Amino acid sequence: MQASESDRLLGTTRAAGRRTRSILAANSFPMILFGLLALGSAAVAEAWPGPAVAVWWLVGAPLASLATALWYRSREMEHGVAANAWPFIATGIGIIVGATTLGFLGRDGALGYAGPLFVIGLGYLVFAWLERSVPAAAMAIGVLVTAIVLALLRPAHAYTIGVVVFGAGSVLVGVMSLVKERRIDG
Amino acid sequence: MAEEESYHPAVDLDETVHQRVRLGVLAILVEADRANFTYLRDSLEVTDGNLSAHLNVLVNAGLVQLDKRFVEGRPRTWVRATPKGRTTFRAEVEALDRLVSRYRASAKA
């Protein structure tokens, strides 16, 4: 009797935890926003080679980060449940600082495009782990592999290839998350 | 050996949290940093009074803490698990797992 009651208790307890985890794993907005930002940077890099793409990121990344923080805040108010934001903030700052530093230090070589892409891949792997998101982890690994391949092959338009892979992957994962969020939000 | 045979996992169950609503509250708060009263009430399908009573038990045991704030002029109660609450929840789930495993093993035999 006690064991079957315990079995039921375990079931309902795990269901409550799973539902909360699903709500907190929502990442459609930042995934789509940063994906579009990356795709936009590819267009800028092709149209205006030179420092324009650096300006694009220096202005766009902080604005997108602010919009993301506001989106998570509105979800918190809407659902009444929130994750600890600090690991996400620390990872986001790590990506911005790491990618900017490597982009600046390696501006005349492969490090300039492969380095930031590698940092972004690592950062997204941390995000995927925090959110327990398999699609985000797969996308992050794809970005890491792309960064390594670009560093080794050094093809023409390497920056554009890298950000298009990242941007398209991010938008795709974001759309998948959006479909899931709509289902959960009912 | 005799000690092992006489051991029953039910002795590891914690009377404070071995209850559907209280364990549910901790399950939610272990996944999240914080949840508000309305989310807990709707997720666990209980009344306001019922949830308040269970939260009081958890607060008195030092397993959760309440944070009452005004948001847009309305009172909102946010609930967080304490480190003790997180540890107690994990220990309880492990004890329940052991109990259920033992039950299933004996049912097979």
Image (cartoon, rainbow, N blue to C red):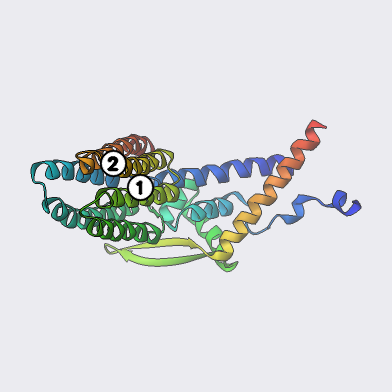
Residue A160 place in picture, x, y as percent: 20, 41
Residue labelled with disc 1: A121
Instruction: Please rate how many residues cluster around mark 1, counting C-alpha atoms within 10 Å: few if below 14, some from 14 to 19, many from 20.
Output: many
Which of the marked residues, 2 or 1, is nearer the chain's N terminus? 1
- Disc 2 marks a residue whose amino acid type is Phe
Q: Is residue A105 above or below residue B5?
A: below
Quarter of the C terminus of chain B within the rendering? top right
Q: Nearer the viewer, residue A35 or A175?
A: A35
**Which residue appears farthest toward the top when viewing the image?**
B108
Residue B61 drawn at (x, y percent) = 60, 66
Is residue A1 in view? no
Q: Secondary structure at mark 2?
A: helix
Residue A135 position (above or below residue B18)? above
| Residue under the image location 15 percent in, 52 percent down | A56
* Mark number, residue B87: none
- What residue lies at 63% left-to-right and 40% top-to-bottom? A8
A78 sits left or right of A44 in the view? right
Q: Nearer the viewer, residue B26 or A134?
A: A134
Q: Is residue A167 left or right of residue A21?
A: left
Q: Position of residue A177 (x, y in %)?
A: 35, 38
User: Callout 2: residue from which chain?
Assistant: A
Q: Nearer the viewer, residue A178 or B39?
A: A178
Residue A117 image offset from top left, x and y in percent: 30, 48
Residue A134 seen anywhere in this rendered image of the structure: yes
Judging from the image, mark 1 belongs to the subunit labelled A
Which residue sits furthest left?
A: A48
Q: Are marks 2 and 1 in contact (CB under 8 Å)?
A: yes
Q: Circle 2: is it few (<14), some (14-19), or many (20+) Cα within 10 Å?
A: many
Name the residue tied to disc 2: A166
Helix or strand or loop: what does disc 1 sit on? helix
**Mark 2 to mark 1: distance in Å?**
8 Å
Q: Are marks 2 and 1 on the same chain?
A: yes
